[in-house]
Amino acid sequence: MHMVIMGAGRGLITTIRAVRPLVKRLTVVVPSSNDTGMDALIRRMGPYPGAGVALHIIQQFGTDAAAGRLMQQVFPPFGTPYDNVPFAVFDTMAHALSLGSLSEAIQRLRAMVHCEIDVLMATEQVHDVLVHGDSANVERSSVYFARAHTGTVQSVALDPPVTANAAVIQALKTADAVVIAPGALYSEVMPTILAEGIAETFKSMRGRVLCVAGLTTVPSQTDAYRAVDYVARIARALGRGAIDVALINTLGYSPNELATLRSVGSTPMRFDPADSDVLDALGVGFVGRNVRNPARTDESPDVKNLATHNELELRMGCMMALKVVS
């Protein structure tokens, strides 16, 4: 089976680990719109998009330990823009400048660390993400999400409009299944699917498409969202018929866990049986499963643990969801 996973962040990492035992070939598609941290450095080096997520995934899943340690080496801080930037960034960008191709340099890194996963940027064109919130102002996402908001995001768009990486389109066309990994909806997930050509390909591809809903809300992005709202935003962005089925958590949170989430401005993305009517209207099937990490017995629940899918349960959930539409 050839599977494509799309997304970024901790949800993408968990999804990769969950499905790797199920597939023979795995392609990961990541956003390339970020302009902060190491991506700011990459974008200053030439007409390059933010490749930081792609480089991180390759290093994370490389099997050559020695090469991996070398590429992850961080130099001591000197109060410069290069502080805390892994050596993999400098090595890859040096080869990008030498080869005249960032994608070739990324593939070179992949071969060096023996990463068996094919990692692709959604687009190879330089762009930003613009956010339209409750106000009339439209701002770059890195600026908008850097501060707290009480309203909701109305829409996001790529600026300028860019075309999808041709290798991504080909991967989607040949995939047996596509999984949209859970993550921060407007900063990690949407930038991965908005490049021109992706939505059209989703509607015509032969592979089955699964959207994994997030577990908890993200402040300034999905405040007060239910799980069905999360899925609906992605489904509407891709168009009717693009998503076959959604996998949604049905395990609740204890009062202590709820208090922990509220302390960081987050809440669970709830799901009630009546919400399935919304999915029906969008033409999206539904599989409910307890896919969050099990409750801990201590008195101080970990926020990261509460917002992260359980790897084994996510694997089983993906198997169930994809079987539903097979």
Image (cartoon, rainbow, N blue to C red):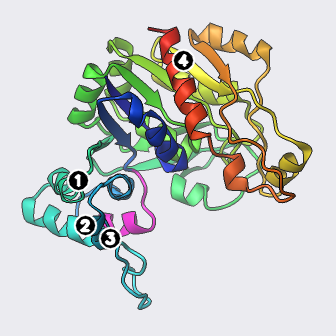
Labels 3 & 1 near each other (Cβ < 8 A)? no
* Mark found first going from the N terminus, 2 or 1: 2
Q: Which residue is mark 1?
A: 114
Distance from the alpha carbon under mark 3 to that under mark 1: 13 Å
Circles 2 and 1, Cβ within 8 Å, touching? The answer is yes
Earlier-in-chain disc, 2 versus 4? 2
**Which amino acid is tagged 2?**
Ala
Residue closest to the eye, 179 or 39:
179
Residue occupied by mark 3: 69
Quadrant housing residue 76: bottom left
Mark 2 and mark 3 in contact? Answer it, CB < 8 Å.
yes
Is tag 3's residue or tag 1's residue first in the polypeptide sequence?
3
Regarding residue 299, the answer to whether it shows in the image is: yes
Which amino acid does the dot numbered 1 rest on? His
Q: Mark 2 and mark 4: span between their CA atoms?
A: 37 Å
Circle 2 — which element?
A: helix
In the picture of the structure, the residue carrying the numbered disc 4 is 321
